[in-house]
Image: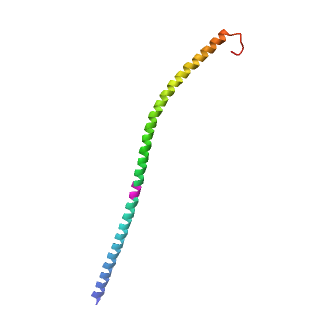
Amino acid sequence: MMIWVALGVLLGAVAGGAAYAALRGFQFYRDLKRGGAALTSEVDRVSAASLRIDRQLMKAEAATGRLTNATARLAISWARLEVQCAAVHQAHARMRRVFWFVPGI
């Protein structure tokens, strides 16, 4: 009789252990699926962010070219302005020498 009780306890322990292992395995599978979905969504988010960054870099490169051209045009305009200001100052100085007797010139 004692053997049957021990055999029953053994079978109960094996069945309980198998059930526990099956439940833990199923929970692990669900966590793995959930984690995989989260990983996929994060990879998609990072991919979208990298595409936005790539587009912004392309725009920045185009803007750099335009900025270089604008800087060159500005330097030319600044040189022309300096020449014109020098001409105006020179003309003003000549007018002051010629019309030294007129106040305000």
In the image, residue 42 lies in the stretch drawn in magenta: yes
39 displayed left or right of 89: left
Judging depth in this view, the residue of 13 and 97 nearest the camera is 97
What residue appears at the point 46 percent right and 31 percent down from the top-left corner? 68
Reply above or below: 95 against 13: above
What residue appears at the point 30 percent right and 87 percent down from the top-left corner? 5
Reply above or below: 56 against 103: below
Residue 23, horizontal then vertical, whole percent: 36, 73
Which image quarter: residue 94?
Answer: top right
Q: Main secondary structure of the magenta part?
A: helix
Disc tally is 0
What residue appears at the point 42 percent right and 44 percent down from the top-left corner? 55
> What span is colored magenta in the figure?
39-43
Q: How is the image coloured?
A: rainbow
In this view, the residue farthest toward the bottom is 1
Residue 14, horizontal then vertical, whole percent: 30, 78
Reply above or below: 33 against 103: below
Which image quarter: residue 38?
Answer: bottom left
Judging depth in this view, the residue of 101 and 35 nearest the camera is 101
What residue appears at the point 41 percent right and 57 percent down from the top-left corner? 41
In the image, residue 75 lies in the stretch drawn in magenta: no
